[in-house]
Image (cartoon, rainbow, N blue to C red):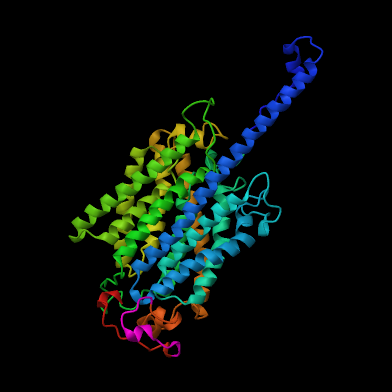
Amino acid sequence: MAAISCSASDLQPLLGAAANATAAAQYICGRFDAVSNKFVDTAYAVDNTYLLFSAYLVFAMQLGFAMLCAGSVRAKNTMNIMLTNVLDAATGGLFYYLFGFALAFGTPSNGFIGQHFFGLNKFPSQSFDYGYFLYQWAFAIAAAGITSGSIAERTQFVAYLIYSSFLTGFVYPIVSHWFWSADGWASPARADNLLFGSGVIDFAGSGVVHLVGGIAGLWGALIEGPRIGRFDHEGRSVSLRGHSGTLVVLGTFLLWFGWYGFNAGSFLNILKAYGESGSYYGQWSAIGRTAVTTTMAGCSAALTTLFGKRLLSGHWNLTDVCNGLLGGFAAITSGCSVVDPWAAIICGFVAAWVLMGCNKLAEKLKYDDPLEAAQLHGGCGSWGIIFTALFAKKAYVDEVYSGQPNRPYGLLMGGGGKLLAAHLVQIVVIVGFVSLTMGTLFFLLHKLKLLRISSEEEMAGMDVTSHGGLAYVYNEECSNLDPAMLKPGFVVSRTAPPSSAV
């Protein structure tokens, strides 16, 4: 918000020829400038408060990830998956502070990688304040959390620490620089030389966050192979059900709640008028619309999954509906700010079928992903990128990306195919870059025997073999486990829980 200036020389003639007119004009302008500066300060405070609140919402999604992951795995691996979620945040925080933010947003820089603000040196600046760092860090650890779900129940703990550090400190920041930094080669915020005259409209990260995390998880799960017992000796799929539908639902609702910060918060500020000031319509209206499109996509995907799975399997499946809901959110994340609510309903409907189709393909290929993370975030994220290029509305694109008028917009909205071309490029480069980096990392960990745990440990459960005991105390034997007994081959007898829980 720019300050409104007052000139004593312009004001003095209006005060007449009195002897003290000059002093009066100077006094009035001085008071006016003070009030104007207070309005500027207030605008900064309001915008930064909005951004910080959004950052807190996105960070709360980590709790949602933790609950969803815990409920989706068997009880014997609960502490392991919960600890990996905690360490995604802690490890990601350190590495994003040291390297990640600088590689992503260290401007001025070239189109491929940032060059400033390592360790938040010379921070804050005219461009960024601390709230912006916190918000972007919350996004970075979300990508790492996606990947952890794909490789759950069979991965060595050291592998989690290595991949999480590498993903949040190097891979994710470079991708976010390409599409979100003002200097990025495919960013819609570039001053000139926009990709296909548009840049990529990935507003809150269907590609930058979800596709990155999904492809990373895909390679981890492919290289590790499926869990023991996931497919029988004839190659038929065997369900290894998660142990708690309650935790799955709790995690889903927490993620839903946090997604409003993820999508609507990506505007970064709220005090911005569209056109003449003093109107009821401004960026605050676009933020509200974004929250509505997010909601509609998730609701549409949940209901489509509910009835779709009923037709396909004959059951009203709780876990599938929760995953379908999240698939709708992952898809709408790219275009949430530039589409109408009716289009978001279409987005969620298609996302549900994309997820169900990806899950069928995964079964045929004997691919095992305990949380369907690669299918959900990779598949639905890719659909979301394409959806935006089809349904982005010209009026909304011009409002949200006001620096460049007459941008290309959605193909089905009459905007031509340039935006679609840019978005297809995004999918290709993300899949290629993440495959090259994270695929190579997981392959090296596999060759160094640092990736997968032994079959004895996998059968016993990682809580027993790696974390000092079980998450749940079922009987006296479980409550008095001696850590010295926790070695490969040791199996705790369980009498209380059903067999499907372990």
Question: Does residue 372 belong to the magenta stretch?
Answer: no
Please tell me which residue is depicted at 40% across the width and 62% down the height of the picture.
Answer: 374
Question: Measured along the vertical axis of the image, is residue 454 above or below residue 120?
Answer: below
Quadrant in which the N terminus is drawn: top right
Total numbered badges shown on the rendered structure: 0
Question: Does residue 478 belong to the magenta stretch?
Answer: yes
Question: Measured along the vertical axis of the image, is residue 135 above or below residue 31?
Answer: below
Question: Measured along the vertical axis of the image, is residue 230 above or below residue 429?
Answer: below
Q: Position of residue 236 (x, y in %)?
A: 25, 73
Q: In the current view of this chain or complex, which residue is farthest to the top?
A: 17
Quadrant in which the C terminus is drawn: bottom left
Residue 447 or residue 403, whichever sits in front: 403
Which image quarter: residue 153? bottom left
Residue 24 or residue 377, whichever sits in front: 24
Question: Measured along the vertical axis of the image, is residue 102 above or below residue 17?
Answer: below
Which image quarter: residue 498? bottom left
Q: Position of residue 78 (x, y in %)?
A: 38, 73
Which region shows up in magenta?
471-484
Please tell me which residue is depicted at 60% across the width and 45% down the height of the picture.
Answer: 182
Left/right of residue 453 with respect to residue 299 in the rendered view? right
Please tell me which residue is depicted at 79% across the width and 11% down the height of the picture.
Answer: 18
Q: Position of residue 74 (x, y in %)?
A: 33, 73
Q: In the current view of this chain or complex, which residue is farthest to the right?
A: 19
Tell me, yes or no, if residue 382 can be seen here. Answer: no
Tell me, yes or no, if residue 340 can be seen here. Answer: yes
Residue 149 or residue 318, whichever sits in front: 318
Q: Position of residue 375 (x, y in %)?
A: 37, 60
